[in-house]
Image (cartoon, rainbow, N blue to C red):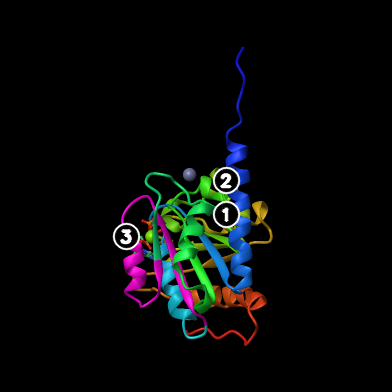
Amino acid sequence: MTREVAIEQPILDLNDRLAADNRALLDKHKIYMLDVLASPGAGKTSLILATIAALRDRWRIAVIEGDIASDVDSQRIKEQGIPAVQINTGGACHLESAMIKRALDILNLNELDIIIVENVGNLVCPTDFYLGEDAKVMILSVPEGHDKPLKYPGVFQVAKAVLLNKIDTLNVFNFDERQFKEDVGRLNPQATIFPVVAAGEQGGKGITAWSQWLCAQIEQKSSGGGCSVRQ
Ligand SMILES: Nc1nc2c(ncn2[C@@H]2O[C@H](COP(=O)(O)OP(=O)(O)OP(=O)(O)O)[C@@H](O)[C@H]2O)c(=O)[nH]1
Ligand SMILES: [Mg+2]
Ligand SMILES: [Zn+2]
């Protein structure tokens, strides 16, 4: 006789319990945590750096960097004088709440307002793992193609905001922005879409609108004081 063992569900249940602990800890410290999802190279670190530049006058920010290997991205963040914790998953293609818990133990939570998590580059399984964050957002970059909402619907559905990055390359890649917006709107009508350029010669385009949206989200959790975004 063979028996099927559903292994996925207990793992997700345990993950959710630890994520709830993370969330309680963050709430106690009034820290807003954002989980950034995207494919490898879509511009996660670039967007995080641009967001830090826009918000650092107003908020105290730290970054948790998730990568399979290396500390390349956390070094880029630390160069800006921002605390960063690198998590190397050793092969796992997503972050789990237990990993975030260990990173929270290292950070000084009394001196932070925002934690930005850069998840492992992957459009699939990070979608299923709640880490205790206040919101997930996702980035699609123009070279990946406008058909991605149809092929990877899950990540577009969990995102509170969708960033369309590298719009400086729209013409080169024949990207149909109207179709993209239509498909995202069908999957997730609540998601706000922000076309941006996170890096390069036109770097900074659209970042103010995105940062103002994020600032308003954070405001709802913090003790007030208003939003101010450096342009
Ligand atoms: N032209 C253009 N290039 C960009 C833009 N944003 C990022 N890049 C470039 O895209 C490459 C990847 O950017 P990263 O920010 O490292 O991407 P990532 O998603 O963090 O990559 P991984 O962490 O390796 O998954 C870099 O060479 C960036 O300079 C953009 O808006 N326009
Ligand atoms: Mg990166
Ligand atoms: Zn995975």
Q: Is residue 181 magenta?
A: no
The location of residue 123, given as percent across then percent down, is 49, 49
| Of labels 3 and 2, the one closer to you | 3
Q: Residues within 10 Å of mark 2 (few under 14, many from 20)?
A: few
Q: Report which residue position mark 1 lands on.
A: 179
Residue at image coords 57%, 50%: 129
Mark 1 / mark 2, whichever is N-terminal? 2
Q: Which amino acid, mark 1?
A: Gln
- Residue 147 visible (yes or no): no
**CB-based contact (under 8 Å), mark 3 and mark 2:** no
Q: Which amino acid, mark 3?
A: Asp
Residue at image coords 49%, 64%: 104
Q: Residues within 10 Å of mark 3 (few under 14, many from 20)?
A: some
From the viewer's perspective, is residue 204 above or below residue 2?
Answer: below
Mark 1 / mark 3, whichever is N-terminal? 3
Q: Report which residue position mark 3 lands on.
A: 71
Q: Secondary structure at mark 3?
A: loop
What is the C-alpha distance between the residues marked 1 and 2? 11 Å
The location of residue 97, given as percent across then percent down, is 54, 54
Q: Report which residue position mark 2 lands on.
A: 150
Side of 67 where 226 appears, left or right: right
- Residue 155 visible (yes or no): yes
Q: Quadrant of the N terminus?
A: top right
